[in-house]
């Protein structure tokens, strides 16, 4: 799957990029018509520990799916986002197969 990654207020290292790509590739097991994914990593300038925001937009036929999570680490955010997207993709696939 093609992934566009943007990091705001910092530079993402290769380990984070590889981790994200690996997690997103697993989504194709649940829905094989994924066109591409846009991933946005942002760091908020706050004193709170949970200042890292991950937003993932996935383009699929019939509309886009967007998930936004805030955590203390980007890896945890990616995990939460992928789990949420997995549930959404399964629902989308069930709806599509019900119409066929």
Image (cartoon, rainbow, N blue to C red):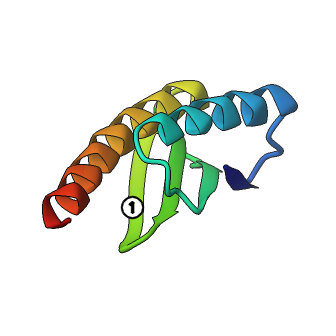
Q: Nearer the viewer, residue 80 or 31?
A: 31
The residue that appears at 80% across and 25% down in the rendered structure is 15
Q: How many marks overall?
A: 1
Q: Residue furthest bottom?
A: 62
Q: Residue furthest left?
A: 98
The residue that appears at 29% across and 48% down in the rendered structure is 88
What residue does disc 1 label?
65
Give the quadrant of residue 74: top right
Counting from the top left corner in percent of width and height, residue 19 is at 69, 27
The residue that appears at 52% across and 41% down in the rendered structure is 28
Q: Residue furthest front?
A: 100
Q: Is residue 79 above or below residue 45?
A: above
Neighbor class of circle 1 (other Cα within 10 Å; few <14, some 14-19, many 20+) is: some
Counting from the top left corner in percent of width and height, residue 38 is at 62, 59
Q: Is residue 63 above or below residue 45?
A: below
Counting from the top left corner in percent of width and height, residue 61 is at 43, 70
Give the quadrant of residue 82: top left
Counting from the top left corner in percent of width and height, residue 17 is at 76, 36
- Does the rendering let one see residue 19? yes
Q: Quadrant of the C terminus?
A: bottom left
- Does the rendering let one see residue 51? no
Secondary structure found at label 1? strand
């Amino acid at each position: 799957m093609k992934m566009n990654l943007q990091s705001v207020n910092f530079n993402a290292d290769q380990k984070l990029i590889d981790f994200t790509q690996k997690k997103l590739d697993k989504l194709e097991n649940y829905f094989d018509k994924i066109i591409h994914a846009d991933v946005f990593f942002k760091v908020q300038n706050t004193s709170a520990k949970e200042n890292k925001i991950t937003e993932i937009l996935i383009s699929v036929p019939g509309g886009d799916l967007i998930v936004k999570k805030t955590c203390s680490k980007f890896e945890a955010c990616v995990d939460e986002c992928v789990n949420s997207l997995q549930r959404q993709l399964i629902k989308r696939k069930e709806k599509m197969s019900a119409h066929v």
